[in-house]
Amino acid sequence: MKEFWNERYAQQEFIYGTEPNEFLREILKLLPIGRIILPCDGEGRNAVFAAKLGWEVNAFDFSPSAKEKASTLAKQEKVNPVFEVADIVEKEFKDNTADVVALIYAHFPEGLRKIAHQKAIKWLKPGGKLVLEAFNPKQLDNSSGGPKNIEMLYTEEMLREDFKELKIEYLQVLETNLSEGEFHKGKADILRLIAKK
């Protein structure tokens, strides 16, 4: 899996574009500026956007190619988010230190998903917000990106169970039209979640 992503991110163009995820953009503009953790942030579009708003950013991805592109984008935009090469299983931050943890298209098989979601909960401060956007199982019928393994696609029930320790403020299953670079383009079936610790 790591080799697949490294190869994909090694392309010259930004495969998911350089603009942030639209849902994350909307939410961050409404919240007081603080510290954000962005796991699986790929080429850094969300990390760079948050840094431009003034957030203290810790982002990571397990692909060295992704980090190189994130660094290039950060230099272009004259910001300096902390972006590391790391795996969600190994990565640790202090508990209760993030104002926001954003999981944007961070898809994992079941065992890893539970680990990742538990870590996100631990990292959040009391009162902190979890922001998530991901594909749901209907996405298998679309050609706009996402895993082709149904076990890696998320349902409303799955998210309610994974984040039952948090107060779910918003959870929507919807059909949308993605325009995020070459690999997230067209009709898509997604879920969006905001939950508070």
Image (spheres, rainbow, N blue to C red):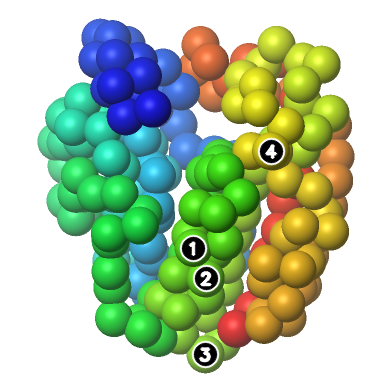
Q: Is residue 14 visible?
A: no
What residue sits right under mark 4 in the picture?
151
Quarter of the image holding residue 176? top right
Q: Element at badge 2?
A: helix
Q: Are marks 1 and 2 in contact (CB under 8 Å)?
A: yes
Q: Residue furthest front?
A: 111
Q: If you read the primary sequence from the N terminus, does the residue marked by circle 4 or circle 3 appear first?
A: 3
Image quarter hosting the C terminus: bottom right
Image depth: mark 4 or mark 3 in front: 4
Q: Residue at x 80, y 48 (%)?
A: 155
Q: Is residue 153 above or below residue 32?
A: above
Q: If you read the primary sequence from the N terminus, does the residue marked by circle 4 or circle 2 appear first?
A: 2
Count of number-bearing discs: 4
What residue sits right under mark 2 in the picture?
118
Image depth: mark 4 or mark 2 in front: 4
Quarter of the image holding residue 78? top left
What residue sits right under mark 3 in the picture?
126
